[in-house]
Amino acid sequence: MSDENGLPAEIALLWGLREMPRRGRKPSLTITDITRAAIEVADAEGLGAVSMARVAKQLGNSTMALYRHVKSKDELFQLMSDAAVEVPPEIPPDSGWRAGLTLWTHSVRRVLSRHPWMAQIPMHGPPSGPGNLAWLDCALGTLADTPLQEAEKIGIVMGLNTFVQGNLRMSVQLMAGFRENPEAFGRSYSRALKQLVDPRLMPALGRVVAAGVFDYDSLYEESDVEADFALTLNFYLDGVAAYLARRS
Amino acid sequence: MSDENGLPAEIALLWGLREMPRRGRKPSLTITDITRAAIEVADAEGLGAVSMARVAKQLGNSTMALYRHVKSKDELFQLMSDAAVEVPPEIPPDSGWRAGLTLWTHSVRRVLSRHPWMAQIPMHGPPSGPGNLAWLDCALGTLADTPLQEAEKIGIVMGLNTFVQGNLRMSVQLMAGFRENPEAFGRSYSRALKQLVDPRLMPALGRVVAAGVFDYDSLYEESDVEADFALTLNFYLDGVAAYLARRS
DNA sequence: CTAATTAGCGTACCTGACACGCAGTTTTCG
DNA sequence: CGAAAACTGCGTGTCAGGTACGCTAATTAG
């Protein structure tokens, strides 16, 4: 269950703190290698392509060799998502909390656009790995100069994180859906809505449809998605600003 | 590809508008039955338990019979998530947009707490089923009395939806993680952070840890999660309010 | 040098999605 | 009215993927 350090096993794993056995054959594979190979596969072919066999092939090993280093595929996923976040951005100390959180958010966005599969990996607990905790620290740092309680800072940052992750997850899903079936985002969608939405039953939606809001060749324009993201992000940050103002 | 109605096949399916074949054996199974059975299984045993075989057993049919009605498991998932949303709330017409959206949000929350598995089903396109569109209409209706453009309303509502879904998804994941390994949310977590977080490398996080923010027997208290949700929801709504104020 | 310990791996099992084709049913048409 | 056509339910089979188990070889402690 727990390391000699007193750490829970899965946390020790993420931090690379499992004690190395002194006797026995020397490992030719490391957890780092396995994690890196898995990330390569996920980057190149998507998370769906990450099977134990595929990762092993990437390394030139056999499938079952991996199980000497990771207890399960899910454990490998956790390792991947802590490793792939890389390093949080350097935030200029005097930039103010809002600019800081905005920069932080866009950095998250950049990481997730490099590794879209990260949005699909489920979290089983609070952030525990060195990568995720470094990002958490980075976000908290932007609030250092505010008069907030530490617990409030955590609430705000976790809320922001959930928000950003949720947004990106949705983007990734829709992007995948778009690649698979672009038609579902185009004229045939707006035509279907015009046909199916009865203005008597759904008046508000009927107005939107009638206004031609969906009449585009593709509802999935990168720039639109980004603009919507920026808009809603600013809603959240405005709320934080109001909260701060209320508190001083 | 498309129905005689000119509708894309997957949309026609969601609306139950596939034309019934005139000749041939009468079906003893309906899509509705299959969907209902699948929802029963998911409610009772989680989405992971929903296999074609399990759903078929629920119905007393053979596995392969389902494929006469559903093209793939994923298609069944889409049917499930449109059916399980049920009916959106009645929002009193004079309640104002903020109260309306708050009520809407809590209704979403209630639906998802009845069917937690919904948060795990990936979306492949814009909302297309009768259930989801009814909810969309309901949310849009709350903004009817505002001077917003229709496109802005959609942006605000979709943003809110993404936000709520993201929050609930995270809750569901953590809830599952908690059931499986409560220890990861308790004292051993805060002890691990105290040990691993070096205040020189992660000063902001170090302060939070030192302040004892994580020193609880369980970080996953229902009431806390709900409070955090309400807090961040209000951030978003404050932002919408500010946007509205700016626009008048 | 021997026993203990550990890494890599081949084999095997199980679960689950789904392709295919047969058999029985219902409707249409000659 | 009878045969052909259309369609449903289903048994069988295939393939992919996770992972338990146990063997073998390497390495080190005693």
Image (spheres, coloured by chain):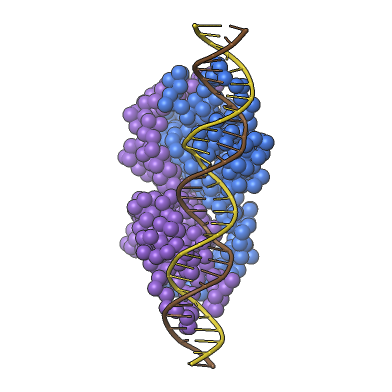
Chain colours: A purple, B blue, C yellow, D brown
Looking at the image, residue B47 sits to the left or right of residue A206; the answer is right
Q: Relative to B152, is A94 above or below?
A: below
Q: Which residue is at the front of the view, A21 or D9?
A: D9
Q: Residue B117's spot in the image, x, y percent?
A: 58, 45
Q: Relative to A187, is A79 above or below?
A: below
Q: Residue at x 54, y 73 (%)?
A: A7
The answer to whether residue B59 is seen in the rendering is: yes
Q: Which residue is at the front of the view, A26 or A175?
A: A26
Q: Residue A201's spot in the image, x, y percent?
A: 55, 21
Q: Residue at x 37, y 44 (%)?
A: A230
Q: Residue B248's spot in the image, x, y percent?
A: 41, 32
Q: Which residue is at the front of the view, A7 or D10?
A: D10
Q: Which residue is at the front of the view, B203 or D24?
A: D24
Q: Relative to A200, is A219 above or below?
A: below
Q: Point out the image quarter for the N terminus of chain B.
A: top left
Q: Residue at x 56, y 55 (%)?
A: B174
Q: Residue at x 41, y 51 (%)?
A: A49
- Image-quadrant location for residue A92: bottom left
- Image-quadrant location for residue A219: top left
Looking at the image, residue A99 sits to the left or right of residue A19; the answer is left
The answer to whether residue B40 is seen in the rendering is: no
